[in-house]
Every structure is written in C-alpha cells, then in structure tokens.
Image (cartoon, grey):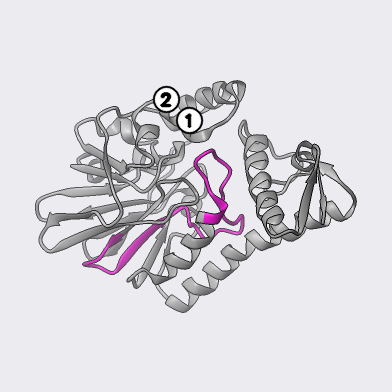
Amino acid sequence: MEELALESPLRFGSVSVYLGEKSGKYPDGNQIVVRGKDMRVAFDTPLVSNRIGPDFDDVDLVILGHAHEDHMAGLHRVPRARVQAHEADLRAVQSWPGLCDHYGYADDVLAEIKLMIDRDFHYHPRPDATGYAHDQLWEPGGGVRIRARHLPGHTSGHCALVVESEGVAFIGDIDLTGFGPYYGDATSSLAAFRKSLVDVAELDAEIWITSHHRGAITDRAQFLADLARFAAKIDERTDRLIGYLREGPQTLDQLVARRLLYPQGFSLPYVESAEFNSIRMHLDELVAQRLVRQAGDCYELA
C-alpha cells in the first residue's frame, strides 16, 4: 500500500485521533491513542497505525473494540503490548482457526481471505490476548478512565470504548457510513445490531469517533441525525427484499445473486457469504413477523 503523509492528530485532552486515508475509509481506519499518566493505550490497530511511529509503537495496551482483519492490522508492530478483546471475540484474535469460526465462511473463501489479510493487513494473531467484559474499566493514570460498553451485532463482541474522563466514545463499526450496518459474519446478529443502534445513543459522551470514514463528530444533533440515517439502511434493505419477493417466490441463492448489501459487480472474497448471511437474517425476521413464508427451498410473501 502506498505510504501517505499523516496530518497532525485530532486531540481531545488525553485522546489523540489519527485519521486514516479518507478519514479511515475501509480498508483503512482511524486510530485512537489515549495517554494516561502511567500507561499509553491504543484502541484497535488499523492500517494507519503502521504510519504513526512511536506514539503508537510504544503503547502499553491495545484494547480491541472488536475482531476483524482491518482492526488488527498493526498488532505486528506492538509485540510487547498487552492485547485485550471482548471475551466473545477473543478466539478470533488469538488464532486463525478462531478467526475462521468468527467469519463462518466456506473453506475456499477462507483460503482467499487468508491470502488477502496476510498481504494487505499484516495479519498477526495474538495467542497471548486476554478477554474483557461489558463495563470493564481501565485506569491508565492521571484520572483517565476508559470503560467498555458491549454493543453487539456487527460481531458478537463488538464494543464501544468510552474515555469517560474526556467524554469521548469510540463507537467502532457503528460507523455511520452511507453503506449502513454490516452483519454478514457467523457471529453477527441483525437483532442485536438493532438493539445496539438504540443503546449507542445513550452513551455518556460529547464526542463520537468512528472506525471508518466519518472520524470525529462533536455535535450531538449531528450524531443523532447520522445515526438515524445509518440505522434506516436496515429497513431499506428489508423493503428491497420484499420488493424482490413481490416478483414471485425465490430461493435464498437467487436472492443472494441479486445482492442486498453490495452493488452488482463488486467483488471481494467474502461478498457472497456476507450477502447470504445478511439476507437469511432479514428473511428470518420477515418469517417471524408472518410477512414471508418458506415453501420448500423458496421464500414468498405471505
């Protein structure tokens, strides 16, 4: 990947935010470093962490808000730092088999992904990583307080990391992008994501930092408006899926071929798997609501 010059970080008291390329648009991300009196802490390790230098390389602790390849791309730079992840995502950080189970894709897809993340994301598992739970508190010194708030859906262990002493909430992949929520993996949950989109608005914060694309939001009204647009993507997808079924009964494979998340022609190794998992979750909701029924291999409007 071409090296890009970094701008000076955004600073909010003890918190520094290094914006990745295009404000952390995937495959990059935004890096938070928190300086306490006794310890320096990083939230996640996106690609931009490889271009920061000592302020990142000398951290004492990495807290992962969740486990995905783009959030682990700097772990190879900090072999002496302690690494922690929510207990529900921990195995995905510790080993490649754990990450395979986390993704839940077919073996041929996983083989392609392994090549991609080794090449593009400096993949480096951390078998020494340890787990944390909801409401975990870290105090790196000087009055700095960091607390984990479990907001599952994107992954089963996805968390916001809140620097309570500064009113800063790192909300990870509740990233407020135009793409909308992603829940395409084996440990994802559409139902849990819906609840987390309500709960994230209740975080005690004045500044919200996303992993991708948006960076820092410092106005609550703007945050709530962006959150509402982001959440609305879920129901827009449901409406589009119902529109497909109005044309007649269709199998899950037929619906996957039509795409719900990604545009036709867009290709990454995991796209069809993500479409399959996501569409199945929407169909399960619609069946539970008695708006859709399953007849053999096909789904049709009830």
Q: What element carries label 1?
A: helix
Q: Residue at x 50, y 24 (%)?
A: 114
Residue 302's disc is none
**Mark before the other along the chain sequence, 1 or 2:** 2
Side of 37 relative to 191 (left or right): left
Residue at horizontal 55%, vertical 40%? 185
Q: Is residue 47 above or below residue 118?
A: below
Horizontal relation, residue 14 to residue 239: left or right? left
Tell me the residue that label 2 is attached to. Answer: 96
Helix, strand or loop under label 2? helix
The mark closer to the camera, 1 or 2, is 1
Please name the predominant secondary structure of the magenta segment in the image: loop
Q: Residue at label 1?
A: 101
* Vertical placement of residue 179 versus 275, above or below: below
Q: What residue is at 49 percent from the left and 41 percent from the top?
A: 187
Q: In which quarter of the image is residue 131?
A: top left
Label 1 environment density (alpha carbons within 10 Å; few <14, some 14–19, many ≥20): some
Give the residues drawn in magenta, as a range: 162-191
Residue type at mark 2?
Trp
Can residue 59 be seen at all in this image of the molecule? no
Choose between 96 and 214: the one closer to the eye: 96
Residue closest to the far right:
247
Inter-mark Cα distance, 1 to 2 = 9 Å
Q: Is residue 172 magenta?
A: yes
- Rendering coords of residue 13 (x, y %): 22, 66
- Say if the magenta span includes residue 215: no
Task: Report how many numbered discs are placed on residues in the image.
Answer: 2
Q: x and y percent of residue 242 in the render?
A: 79, 57
